[in-house]
Amino acid sequence: MTMRPLGINTYSYIWSTPAAECVRRLADLSYRTFELMVHPVHLPLDDFDEGERRRLASVLAEVKATDCSLNIPSLDQNLASAFPRVRAASVQMFRDVINLASDLGIEWLVTVPGRMSPLFPPPLAERSAWIRESIERLLPHAEKRGVRLAIENVPMAAFQNAASLGAFVRGFRSGSVAVCYDAANAHFIGESPAEGIRQLADVLRIFHLSDTGRTVWKHDRVGTGTVPFAELAPALAGAGFAGPCILEIIDAIPRQRFSRATRRSPAWALRRRPRE
């Protein structure tokens, strides 16, 4: 099975390490694909001027980074809020992140499609309408800046499973809107990640890897949960997936975790449990 090298999501570094330093550290471990989290201290949005953006872009070029993306945590914005004023503020925040991605020469923005209350979420039709309105407002600006949106499946978000996410994304009939599919998120809600891959084959562009059980939602290192990794590589191959596989491990000591995956292929991460 031929697949691209593993990439790294930088969530574990958001409180500790500026993005440029983080990229250099991970490049020393032979990584070249990065999903940078937009979050202070790591990668600020408001206090990150033109000069700092040029410097980070230069570091990415220096390490020969490829297939990179940005991602913004969904704690401070909600593209599917029932409140129009919250959606408007969230759209503006995403426009600013799109500008940042473009300034850095990064093509993809991983996009969480709003947050829903797990106690009493709105009907699918209503949440779909709210998030569609938000994406429609973002899309012209994203296309103008050369940035594409990868909508992600998240347990607390508007589209938790592959079926609803795929239907939403296909409704745009645009190559600028696609899917980021997260294996741990799928497994946690009881969905088969392999089946989700097959359902999303035509729109899948980014794939997230980490481990979790089904009782507590986690993004742990491979082999510590119950995600059926052995099923994923064949599913990705059958889907003709050629995009980046991103390790999204959230850990207080990330370098130790990522070091163990250095120079390994995605097939290793998907098929085998790492030695401790």
Image (cartoon, rainbow, N blue to C red):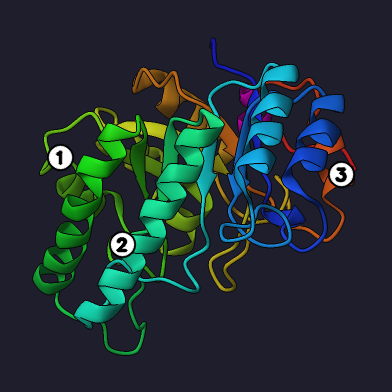
**What element does badge 2 sit on?**
helix
In the picture of the structure, the residue carrying the numbered disc 1 is 170
The residue segment tinted magenta is: 266-271
How many residues crowd mark 3 within 10 Å: few (<14), some (14–19), many (20+)?
some
Q: Which residue is mark 3?
A: 255
CA distance for labels 3 and 1:
37 Å
Look at the image and tell me whether residue 254 can be seen: yes
Q: CA distance from mark 2 to mark 1?
A: 21 Å
The answer to whether 220 appears left or right of 126 in the picture is right
| Contact flag, marks 2 and 1 (Cβ < 8 Å) | no
Q: Earlier in the sequence, mark 3 or mark 2?
A: 2
The answer to whether residue 191 is seen in the rendering is no
Measured as percent of width and height from the top left, residue 186 is found at 43, 54
**Disc 3 + disc 2, Cβ < 8 Å:** no
Q: Residue at x 87, y 55 (%)?
A: 253
Q: Which x, y percent locates residue 123?
A: 14, 77
Tell me the mark number nearer the camera, choosing from 2 and 1: 2
> Going by the image, does 166 lie left or right of 10?
left
Residue 130 percent across, percent down from the top left: 17, 68
Q: Earlier in the sequence, mark 3 or mark 1?
A: 1
Taking the image as shown, residue 243 lies to the left or right of residue 270, namely left
**Residue shown at the point (44%, 30%) measured from the top left:** 107
Please, what is the three-letter code of the amino acid marked with disc 3? Arg
Identify residue type, mark 2: Val
